Amino acid sequence: MESLENKWIEVQCYKHDGLMHRIWDSVFVTKQEKNYIVVASDHTKVVEHDLRLWHTREPAIMIFFDDCWFNIIAMLKDDGITYYVNLASPYIIDKGMIKYIDYDLDLKLYPSNSIKIIDVKEYGYNRRKYQYGEDIDKILRYNLNLVKEMMKKRLFPFDDKKIYELYEEFKKRS
C-alpha cells in the first residue's frame, strides 16, 4: 500500500453513480495504519459538486477505514469535539488521494453525548434515485447501529483524548 503519511493530499467524495460530490483540497496525513488513515485539517478549502467553494470553520481530524462503511470528522470546537459520521464506502487510495462513496445517512455526536441521526430523507430519496440495492441498505443500517453503540461507549475513534493527541501531532508535523 502506498504510504501517504506526512503528506498533504486531497480527499474526494463521490456519489453512488460515480459523480464527484465534494473535495477537501488539502489535508495532512498524520497516521496511516493497517485498517485506517488519519488526516488533519485547519480551515481547509472545500469544493462542492456545483463548484461552490467554502472553508471549514475549525480544525478537524478525519478518520477513514478500509474495512468499515463509515468515516469520521472530529471537529474541534470551542465547546468540545463534535463528531460527524458519514455512512460511506470504505476508502481507497488512488493516485495519492483518498476516495470514497458517500451514502447520505449521517450521525452527529455532540460534546453533551447526545446523538443525532441526520439526512434520513436525503438517504431515502437517493436510495431510489441511485437504486441502492438491498445489500447496501443492510450494510448501512448495520453500520448505523454499530456507530451508535461505539458513540455511546466512546470507543475509538470517539475518544476525545485520542483526537486531541492526533491534533497536537498534526500541529507539530505540518
Image (cartoon, grey):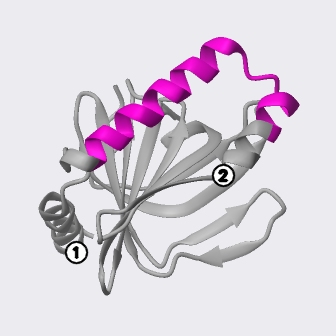
Image quarter hosting the C terminus = bottom left
- In three-dimensional space, the C-alpha distance between marks 2 and 1, rounded to whole angstroms, equals 33 Å
| Left-right relation of 27 to 50 | left
Residue 26 at what x, y percent from top left?
A: 50, 64
Amino acid tagged 2: Asp
Mainly helix, strand or loop, the magenta region?
A: helix
Residue numbers of the magenta segment: 125-151
Q: Quadrant of residue 103?
A: top right
Q: Is residue 134 above or below residue 141?
A: above
* Contact, mark 2 vs mark 1 (Cβ under 8 Å): no
Instruction: Return the residue found at the far top.
Output: 135
Residue at point 37%, 39% (across, down): 147
Q: Secondary structure at mark 2?
A: loop
- 130 and 22: which is toward the camera: 130
Residue at point 41%, 33% (across, down): 145
Residue 50 at what x, y percent from top left?
A: 84, 61
Q: Which residue is mark 2?
A: 119
Q: Is residue 28 above or below residue 129?
A: below
Q: Residues within 10 Å of mark 1 (few under 14, many from 20)?
A: few
Taking the magenta stretch, the answer to whether it contains residue 150 is: yes
Q: Which residue is mark 1?
A: 171
Amino acid tagged 1: Lys
Q: Secondary structure at mark 1?
A: helix
Q: Quadrant of residue 81?
A: bottom left
Residue 102 at what x, y percent from top left?
A: 62, 40
Residue at point 63%, 56% (across, down): 23
